[in-house]
Amino acid sequence: METIAKSPVSLTQDAVNEVKRLMAEPGFEGGQYLRIGVKGGGCSGLSYMLGFDRQEEDDEMFDMEGISVVMKKAHGIYLMGMQVDFQDGLNARGFVFNNPNASSTCGCGTSFAV
């Protein structure tokens, strides 16, 4: 089931570059997509998910700058308007989630409440 829809999430150019770099690494398993989502847990109630995964039946598929992204349909309400960035600085390296819908976040930056 492949549906290309308008994504509720956006990726900065730095995030796009890092995802494409990871996908070009030797040993990257083809047939996987970038998965963005949420799961219960974390110090604020919900945690962000970002990784590579196979498409599942209840996923929506989005194209972001040539990257195929999958997300559970139900996760869209939590992630609407969120921007994923990648920072590569001296103090921090990794993906950063900027979610305008989060009513609170925790110090680790990967957990939030709505």
Image (cartoon, rainbow, N blue to C red):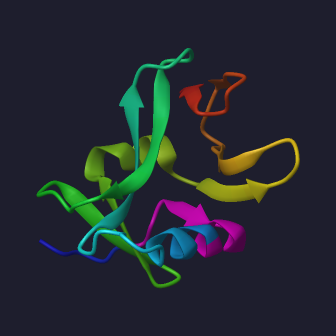
Q: Residue furthest top?
A: 43
Locate the N terminus and report the quarter of the image it occupies. bottom left
- Read off the magenta span: 6-17
Quadrant of the image occupied by residue 102:
top right
Position of 103 compared to 37: left or right?
Answer: right
Position of 91 compared to 68: left or right?
Answer: right
Residue appearing at x 69%, y 74% in the figure: 13
Residue appearing at x 66%, y 23% in the figure: 104
Residue 31: image x %, image y %?
23, 73
Instruction: Give 14 or 38, whichever is nearer the viewer.
Output: 14
Quadrant of the image occupied by residue 84:
bottom right
Residue 100: image x %, image y %?
66, 43
Instruction: Give 71 or 24, whichever is nearer the viewer.
Output: 24
110 lies above or below 85: above
Quadrant of the image occupied by residue 39:
top left
Position of 13 compared to 25: left or right?
Answer: right
Residue appearing at x 86%, y 41% in the figure: 91
80 lies above or below 46: below
Instruction: Give 100 or 24, whichever is nearer the viewer.
Output: 24
Residue 75: image x %, image y %?
36, 44
Residue appearing at x 85%, y 53% in the figure: 89
36 lies above or below 92: below
